[in-house]
Every structure is written in structure tokens, then in C-alpha cells.
Amino acid sequence: MSYALMTDRYELTMLEAAMQSGKADRKCVFEVFTRSLPNGRRYGVLAGTGRVLDAIADFRFGTAELSFLAEEKIVGPKTLEYLSDYKFDGTITGYAEGELYFPGSPVMTVEGSFASAVILETVILSILNYDSAVASAAARMFSAAQGRTLVEMGARRAHEEAAVAAARAAYLVGFSSTSNLEAGRRFGIPTMGTSAHAFTLLHDSEREAFEAQIASHGKKTTLLVDTYDIPEAVKLAVELTGGELSAVRIDSGDLGQTAVAVRKQLDQLGANKTQIVVTSDLDEYTIAGLASAPVDRYGVGTSLVTGSGSPTAGFVYKLVAHETDAGWVDVAKKSAGKASVGGKKHATRRTEQGIAAAELIGNPSEGRKLQQLLWDQGPNHTMIGSTGSDLARENHKLAMAELPPAGRRLSKGEPAIPTEYV
């Protein structure tokens, strides 16, 4: 699959014009950053780096892509010739996937000719903006869950490819599994799933449905108990499994009160080890609200795959420096409300007694280095596939361990640490 046309037209019209002006070969530095965190959030989580590297590796113009550009007269013969042999030949550095970011953090730096780097803008931003929005929301849910298990189950609420990306983003911040089988195949994420209400309704009675599921999957399955009458379903579930049922799932009503009642009933029936799973449009706030309820697992869907109200991270891709005959020149926008800081930047995180205190951007001489080499004549292969997902998950644990306690609050507020330009 080629990602070459998964881009905005103006990337190629800029390339065409740069070819004409003679500036297409000028060496450039582009940076990816966000001017602010969305919706008053206190931190963001970088996700999608591995998918970006995969996409760049497949960013090639074949016969079909070139024919479309020619037929639509989007670019001329000289540009078509350049694109026919296109392969990104620059370098990319950036924050480790799973790392936290703050306003101004240079999460990805792309260096190469203007021609080679400018046409990557859209594919880089489309991946990082969505994946990071999901990961940032998922991280808040993970904190709210306070150690209880979270599973991702939002595939039916998103574009089919976005669903796979969302499952991966949730996994790297601590979700235990996903309902999405393609995410399991591509990235090695554990998959889960038992039955929906349709399975119960298919059978002539709830007993018949439960018996069929247990016969097929054993007592270590999860039975959905809210199709008809919850107390009767719980009683039947315990009876059919001799109290050895793995879990029951509740998908409706007042989840907190229902969980309390179900826990009490399970214990009275001797099913002390049977867990309670709750679903039904959960987000970080409802999860936090269930902290005192006897819930063992949360299944999260719609809110997760839509970024829980912030469906994009707000990343931009800006030219910050280019080379001239006289040397390198720093460049920056001066637009009101959209001003940027010119020049290639390095980033570190200053910590005090192991807790993050500031994001240092520019050319800092102290702090933990945040950027690493991601692409040099090809992708850093430790960052892609299932290996990359597992590495990102570990990176995230380390980054969250540095976050100040106030940064975990769900209420709106200032970024957990300030950004300082040095």
C-alpha cells in the first residue's frame, strides 16, 4: 500500500513551484509540535511514531499515483520525474513513542531537502494527531482506573483503520487488551471478547444461551447478564458454573449501584472470585466515579476512539530553518496567535528528585535527553511493529513515573510542567 496520495494537494503544488524557483533542493528542518494542549489538559502522550515510520517507508509514487497526478495536471513533467524515484533520504529524530509532551515540545524533527520533507507533512500529522489524541485520553482513563484492568473495544465507533490505530494507542499507555483482531495481528496486542446481547436473544432462553457459551468456552468466560433481569441472570450464571465463572458483564443502568448489588449477590452465592466487568459509554470521568464500586475491569469504546472530547492533538509541521549559500537561516511565522520559534531545537526534561520540573527547549545543557534517531536511510526497526508497541509501552511507564502528582488530575488546568526556551 502506498501512502503517497494520502496528502493534501498543496504539498505537491508547493513542490512544483519550488522546482520552478530552484529551491526544491534547499536543505531544510521541519519540526512537529503543538502550541497548546487541548481542552485544558495537563500533558499529552506521543503515539503513532511507529506507524509514521512505516508510512514513510511506503511513501512511494507508483504508476497509478503518477498517472493520477499527470491526468489531473497537479504537477508537471519535471516533478513527475522526481516523484517517480522518490524515497525519503533525510533524517528524522524525535521523542520516544509513549513519551509525554507539552506545548512547544519538538516531538519530531524532519531534516532533508525541501522537496523530500515537505510532502511528508500531511501523513505525519494525520497519524500523530489521531494516535496521540487517543493515547492522551487513554492515559487519563488509565490513571482514573487506579490499577484496575482496562480493555479497548471501540472498533464499531471509528473508521476501520482508525480503530486499529486506536487499539494500539490505548495499549501503549496501559490498556491490557483490545477487541480488534487486526490490531492483535499487526501489533501483537492481546485480544478479548465473549458475546453481545444478540447472542442471548438468538436463543430461546437465557439459560440456553449461557449453556451454549459455557460449553464452547468453558467456565473462564464472561457472561453478559443485563439482557433481561440481572439478579436472575447472575443466579443462573453461578448455578451453571458451580460458582467458578470468570466474570459477569454489565452494560446498562446505574453501573455503580448495580455493581454493588451484583458483588453482594455473587459473594452470597459463593462466587467470590467471579469478577465484574462494566461497559456502556465509559470515559475517564465515569471511571473515576466508579472508584468506590466493586468493579474489576472496564471496557471503553466511543470516548476512547474519539479522544474523549479532544479528537486531535493539535500538532503542526513547521519549517524552522533552511540552508543558504551563506549558511543556515532560522525562520519562523510571526502570525498573530500562530507565531513559532525558529531554529532547530534540542529538548531535555529537567527533573528534581525524580519528578519532572520543566521542559527545556533550545540547546539545553541539563536534563534527560528526549530526542533520539528515528530514521536514517530507513526506519529504526525497534520502533515499528509489535516490538515498537511494547517499547512504547515501557517508555510511557517511565515518563508517567516522572509526572508531578498534580498532573494526573482530571480537572482542567495548566500543563503539569512549564516549557522553558533556553
Image (cartoon, helix red, strand yellow):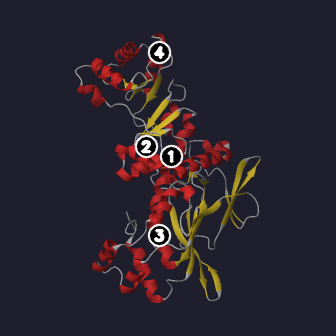
Disc number for residue 303? 2
Write down the residue under mark 3: 120
Q: Amino acid at mark 4?
A: Ala
Q: In front of the other: label 1 or label 4?
A: 4
Quadrant in the picture for the C terminus: bottom right
Q: Are marks 1 and 2 in contact (CB under 8 Å)?
A: yes
Identify which residue is drawn at 54% across, 29% down: 291
Local SS, label 4: loop
What x and y, as percent, mark residue 337?
54, 67
Chain-order first, disc 2 or disc 4: 4
The residue carrying pointer 3 sits among few (fewer than 14), some (14 to 19) or many (20 or more) residues within 10 Å by Cα, namely many
Label 2 and label 4: CA atoms lie apart by: 32 Å
Local SS, label 3: loop
Write down the residue under mark 1: 137
Identify which residue is drawn at 61% across, 51% down: 414
Q: Are marks 2 and 3 in contact (CB under 8 Å)?
A: no
Quadrant in the picture for the N terminus: bottom left
Chain-order first, disc 1 or disc 4: 1
Q: Are marks 1 and 4 in contact (CB under 8 Å)?
A: no
Write down the residue under mark 4: 271
Q: Amino acid at mark 3?
A: Leu
Disc number for residue 22? none
What x and y, as percent, mark residue 128?
49, 58
Identify which residue is drawn at 52% across, 33% down: 149
Local SS, label 2: helix
The residue carrying pointer 1 sits among few (fewer than 14), some (14 to 19) or many (20 or more) residues within 10 Å by Cα, namely many
Rendered image quadrant of residue 78: bottom left
